[in-house]
Amino acid sequence: MFNQTFEIDGRKIGEGCEPYIIAEMSANHGNNLDTAIEIIKEAKKAGADAVKIQTYTADTLTLNCPTPAFEAKGAWEGQYLYDLYLDASMPWEWTPILQKVAEEIGITLFSSPFDVSSIEFLEALNMPAYKIASPEIIDLPFVRRVAQTGKPIIMSTGGATLSQIGDAVAIMVEENVKDLAILKCTSEYPAPPEKIHLKTIPNLKEVFKCPIGLSDHTLGSAIPIASVALGCSIIEKHFIVNRNDTTADSFFSATPDELKAIVDGSKLVYKALGSINYPLVPPKPQRSLIAITDISEGEPLINSKNIKSLRPGGGIEPKYIDKVVNRKAQQEIKFGTLLQWSMVGESL
């Protein structure tokens, strides 16, 4: 149904590929174009494959309606949604400038649209891929319009139920999307480790049969690195150059050192995964039955008295101890000799 590997801007993603690392700019530009440019450059230095921006305005996301229903929840409690998005949004006119910067330094830039107008804007700029943010996964007409672009799609799950994820995936099937990846996501900021449930990653892979990744909101680098061992093909992490720069997302975003740790660590885990492998030839034994005293010819061989299982290997293997004990030494055996069968005579 879906391709197990696909390309974004020439980079292969999915089965048999190193994890694809996305630095999420989100609100961390701080309404400063120079900061946005610096984020892209620092993400490249840290080894990220892509930088993702978000294309929306406060008016495309919500209403300017200061009533309880429009109050922000969680980490942004105390603000109204309109004011939060007004401050966090990135001017759309920056997008072609940031595209040029990314192209010049060799890192992919793509975006999350949030309504039809942002899709049309991004299509005119020939975005190489789209990310569907987790709150938008239940907006099926919007999901369908993204699917109709024919671009690779990365879709985040957030708090969506399995049924809701299935509804969005069904739209992808109907629109003949082949290049789809789904990101396990916990929509808390920062997300506590006990709510991440990494075991969901192989289950998503089994159910939807497409590349699966992690949109990570935890602090630090351990959890996204660990996700690779469970089959994660994509890691998305909010990224900021300096956490002292206060933005809507700064308190849970990765710094350059943390992002580099994720890049390097995920590559190491990916290499360590290898394949199912059992040696066809057993390794040379590491222990032997060894004489721990001088043994006279004809003397009985007794465990822990004159012979013992010790390192190194090269003599009779310890598993044969019961076949050696209480047999006569066939010859004089010096202290430290690795026993050979030719040295072992008849039973007493």
Image (cartoon, rainbow, N blue to C red):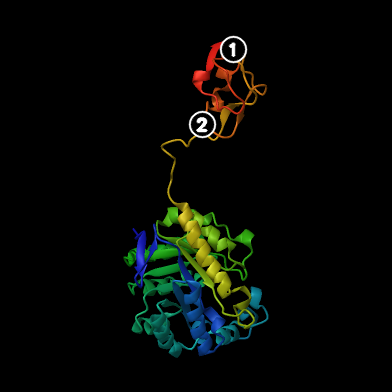
Q: Is residue 341 above or below residue 336?
A: above
- The quadrant of the image that shows the N terminus is bottom left
Q: Quadrant of residue 219?
A: bottom right
Instruction: Identify the secondary structure beneath mark 2.
Output: loop
Mark carried by residue 298: 1
- Picture coordinates of residue 165 (x, y %)? 46, 62
Q: Quadrant of residue 244?
A: bottom right
Query: Residue furthest toward the top?
Result: 348
Residue ID at (36%, 75%): 128
Q: Quadrant of residue 225?
A: bottom right
- Picture coordinates of residue 206 (x, y %)? 44, 53
- The quadrant of the image that shows the C terminus is top right
- Picture coordinates of residue 298 (x, y %)? 59, 12
The crowding category of the residue bearing disc 2, from other C-alpha atoms within 10 Å (few below 14, some 14 to 19, many at least 20), is some
Disc 2 marks a residue whose amino acid type is Gly
Q: Earlier in the sequence, mark 2 or mark 1?
A: 1
Task: Name the front one of labels 2 and 1.
Answer: 1
Q: Nearer the viewer, residue 118 or 218?
A: 218
Q: Nearer the viewer, residue 120 or 98?
A: 98
Measure how far apart labels 2 and 1 are at the Cα level: 23 Å
Q: Nearer the viewer, residue 80 or 231?
A: 231
Numbered marks: total: 2
Q: Nearer the viewer, residue 57 or 267?
A: 267
Q: Is residue 12 visible?
A: yes
Q: Is residue 42 left or right of residue 150?
A: right
Q: Is residue 337 above or below residue 42?
A: above
Instruction: Identify the secondary structure beneath mark 1.
Output: loop
Residue hosting label 2: 314
